[in-house]
């Protein structure tokens, strides 16, 4: 199991994220803004910082369930629910925002957080099981809108452009994640598998020379 750990900065409410179990929502080196936990109500889907029993490390994972026995968590990039069950006194805080370089964004919890995590696990499952004999199925699914309807609003793909000596390059992003490119003078988009399931390719810009950077 991969764990997402943190190191503490001078401000105890600001932590440096380490690990890969919360990719792509969080990546190593991101600075996390954490609201201290003082017994407030938690929701499934919230991203929390905690210290599990038998450990001294701070872990960042998402709440998956809250019950009479305690709180269960899982990293977005993990297939299995964490083995521990947390008590309220083991929770340090809830992650409310993250910063990577000069860019800062809100970290969603609750229903939006659950939807985000479920989408990432679905993408990972499809990608890990992909092979040549599944290609026709992938092509058919990419032409439908089944998966696009499941995509949370904050994960709606967006296009940005860059000026290059040979023309304009377009990039397709979901959050901070580059999932596709259209290079100057190319007639088609190059979209990473399996993200074509989440993109209406016909709606993407078709003429890079007319895009402004």
Image (cartoon, grey):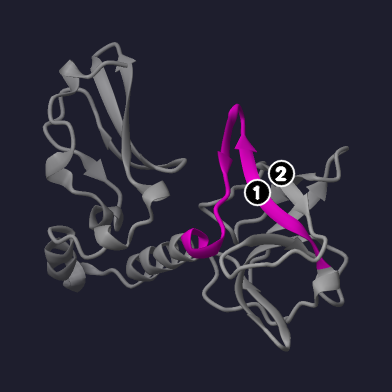
* Residue 110 picture location, percent across and down: 55, 63
Q: Looking at the picture, does residue 72 appear above or below residue 149?
A: below
Q: Which residues are magenta?
A: 91-113
Between 105 and 197, the residue placed more toward the observer is: 105
The quadrant in which the C terminus is found is top left
Q: Main secondary structure of the magenta part?
A: strand
> Looking at the image, do the residues carrying marks 2 and 1 touch, with CB atoms under 8 Å apart?
yes
Give the residue furthest to the top: 165
Relative side of 197 to 92, left or right: left
Which residue has dot 1 on it?
96
Q: Which corner quadrant of the image does residue 190 belong to?
A: top left
Measure how far apart labels 2 and 1 are at the Cα level: 6 Å
User: Picture coordinates of residue 79 (x, y %)?
Assistant: 52, 75
The magenta stretch spans residue 111 = yes
Let me know if residue 102 is in the magenta part: yes
Q: Nearer the viewer, residue 188 or 48?
A: 48
Q: Crowding near pointer 1: few (<14 within 10 Å), some, many (20+)?
A: some
Name the residue furthest front.
40
Within the image, what quadrant is residue 109 found in? bottom right
Q: Which residue is mark 2?
A: 33
**Sequence-earlier tag: 2 or 1:** 2
Along the line of sight, the residue nearer the viewer: 18 or 26: 26
Residue 162 in the image, given as x and y percentages of width and height: 34, 20
At x 30%, y 49%, the residue is 192
């Amino acid at each position: 199991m991969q764990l997402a750990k943190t190191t503490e900065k001078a401000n105890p409410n600001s932590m440096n994220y380490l690990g890969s179990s919360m990719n792509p929502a969080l990546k190593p080196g991101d600075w996390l803004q954490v609201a201290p936990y003082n017994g407030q109500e938690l929701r499934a889907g919230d991203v929390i910082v905690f210290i599990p029993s038998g450990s001294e490390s701070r872990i960042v994972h998402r709440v998956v369930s809250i019950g009479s026995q305690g709180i269960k968590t899982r990293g977005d990039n993990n297939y299995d629910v964490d083995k521990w069950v947390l008590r309220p006194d083991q929770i340090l805080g809830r992650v409310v925002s993250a910063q990577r370089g000069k860019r800062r964004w809100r970290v969603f919890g609750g229903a939006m957080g659950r939807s985000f995590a479920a989408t990432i696990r679905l993408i990972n499952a499809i990608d890990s099981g992909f092979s040549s004999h599944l290609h026709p199925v992938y092509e058919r699914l990419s032409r439908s809108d089944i998966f696009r309807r499941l995509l949370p609003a904050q994960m709606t793909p967006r296009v940005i452009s860059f000026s290059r000596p040979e023309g304009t390059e377009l990039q397709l992003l979901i959050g901070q994640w580059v999932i596709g490119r259209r290079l100057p003078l190319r007639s088609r988009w190059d979209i990473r598998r399996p993200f074509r399931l989440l993109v209406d390719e016909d709606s993407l810009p078709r003429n890079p020379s007319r895009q402004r950077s």
